[in-house]
Every structure is written in structure tokens, then in C-alpha cells.
Image: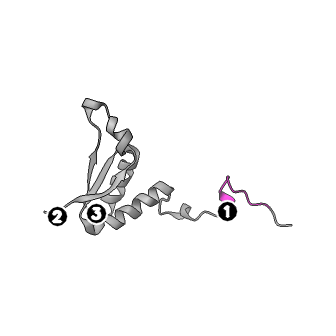
Amino acid sequence: MEDYKKAAVLENEFEAQLVTSVLSEREIPHRLRSYHDTAFDGLFQTQKGWGTVSSPEEHHQEIKEILTDLRLGHSGGAEDNPSPRSNPLNPVRPSK
């Protein structure tokens, strides 16, 4: 059995669901551990983050890259490099 070590801390349940989906799709072995404790009603999640993702060490860099992309809102699709005209927060002004 492979040795799983903590690769990253997850910020919330939504992020945990997204990273699980991507890791499963890429067939990267992983385990999630939530910091939620019913006795303390999730108190530690506000201090430590939602939980952790663990995997064999050879996958840690890829997991960190996936998390960075998720946190920046990159989906890996065509929208990663949208044209300036498609961004309503950065309108393109006509040249004079």
C-alpha cells in the first residue's frame, strides 16, 4: 500500500468536492480528511481550513497546481484565455 501524506489544506467543502472530481477524473490516488468534529460543531474548520487532501508524494505538485487553478477560477477550457471583449470587468475601449 502506498504511503499517503498531506498534500494541501482545503479551504471549504465546495473546494473539496471540486478537487475530488478533478483528481478522480485524472485517476490520481487521494484521500480527503475533514477537520469537522461534531462535538465542537466544526470549530476547527474556521481555524485550520475545511480539511486536507492526502496522496502519495509523487502527486503532490500536480495536486497543488490543480488547487491553484481552481482557486484562480481556471477550468482548463477555452475560457482560461478569454478575449478582452468577453470580460465585462475589463471593457475594451475603441482606439482613437
Q: Nearer the viewer, mark 2 or mark 3?
A: 2
- In the rendered structure, which amino acid carries the disc numbered 1? Pro
Question: According to the image, label 3 marks what residue?
Answer: 27
C-alpha distance separating marks 1 and 2: 46 Å
Whether 53 is among the magenta residues is no
Residue at 25% in and 30% down: 39
Query: Which x, y percent locates residue 11?
Result: 40, 47
Magenta highlight range: 85-93
Q: Mark 2–mark 3 contact, CB under 8 Å?
A: no
Please report whichever mark, 1 or 2, sits nearer to the chain's N-terminal start: 2
- In the rendered structure, which amino acid carries the disc numbered 3? Glu
Query: Which x, y percent locates residue 89?
Result: 67, 53
- In the rendered structure, which amino acid carries the disc numbered 2? Glu
Q: Is residue 95 above or below residue 47?
A: below
Question: According to the image, label 1 marks what residue?
Answer: 84
C-alpha distance separating marks 3 and 1: 34 Å
Q: Can you say which quadrant of the picture contains the C terminus?
A: bottom right
Q: Is residue 44 above or below residue 63?
A: above
Whether 90 is among the magenta residues is yes
Is 28 placed left or right of 49 in the picture?
Answer: left
Residue at 31% in and 64% down: 60
Estimate how packed mark 3 is, as few (under 14), some (14 to 19) or many (20 or more) residues with alpha carbons within 10 Å: few
